[in-house]
Image (cartoon, rainbow, N blue to C red):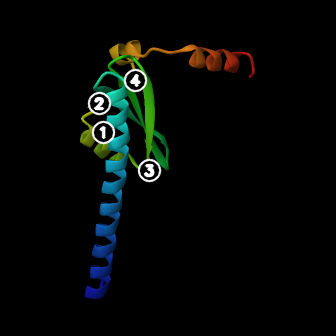
Amino acid sequence: MSSAETATTAASDTRAQRRDQRRAERIAKNIRSFAEQHGGSVEGVVENVSGIATRIVLVGTDGSWGDQVAPTRAVGLRAAELAGVKLHEDFEGELALRVRTGAYEWKRMAGSQLGG
């Protein structure tokens, strides 16, 4: 690889890193906003959705839940770190038991059982 190609590749990598950092900061801002609205802190799980996205499932102190989607697992993990999310390995046990579901969720779950 020539020195010009090496410089181009390095510049491209730097731009990608800055882009990913901005994405993580934007997602972290949304997570902090969710935390403020739901008890001050959040815990969560970073899950792979597909080959093209990662989902950060969040549970607030009050039991409310939400999520954020990141383009990669690395961006999702960085966003969670920036927002101060206590991460769990999986969405089971104590974390899952803290989730409060409302009428909307129950209706949606019933609808899927009834073909709706």
State the residue position of label 2: 87
- The residue under the point 49% across, 48% down is 51
| Percent coordinates x, y for residue 81 in the rendering | 25, 40
- Residue under circle 1? 80
Are the residues tagged 3 and 2 within 8 Å (C-beta)? no
In whole angstroms, how far apart are the C-alphas of marks 4 and 1?
15 Å
Q: Can you tell which quarter of the image residue 86 is in?
A: top left
Which numbered disc, 3 or 4, marks the residue that appears first in the sequence?
3
Which amino acid, mark 3? Answer: Pro
First along the sequence among labels 4 and 1: 1
Give the residue pinned by disc 3. 71
Q: Mark 4 points at which residue?
A: 91
Labels 3 and 2: the sequence-earlier one: 3
Q: Distance between the residues labelled 2 and 4?
A: 10 Å
Earlier sequence position, callout 2 versus callout 1: 1
Residue 66 percent location from the top left of the image: 45, 29
User: In the structure shown, which secondary structural element does the residue marked by tag 2 occupy?
Assistant: strand
The amino acid type found where label 1 is placed reads: Ala
Question: Residue at left 25%, top 42%?
Answer: 82
- Front residue of 40/10: it is 40
Q: State how far apart marks 1 and 3 are (Cα).
A: 13 Å
Measure how far apart labels 3 and 4 are at the Cα level.
20 Å
The amino acid on which the numbered mark 4 sits, given as a three-letter code, is Phe
Rendered image quadrant of residue 112:
top right
Q: Which amino acid type is shown beneath numbered disc 2?
A: Leu
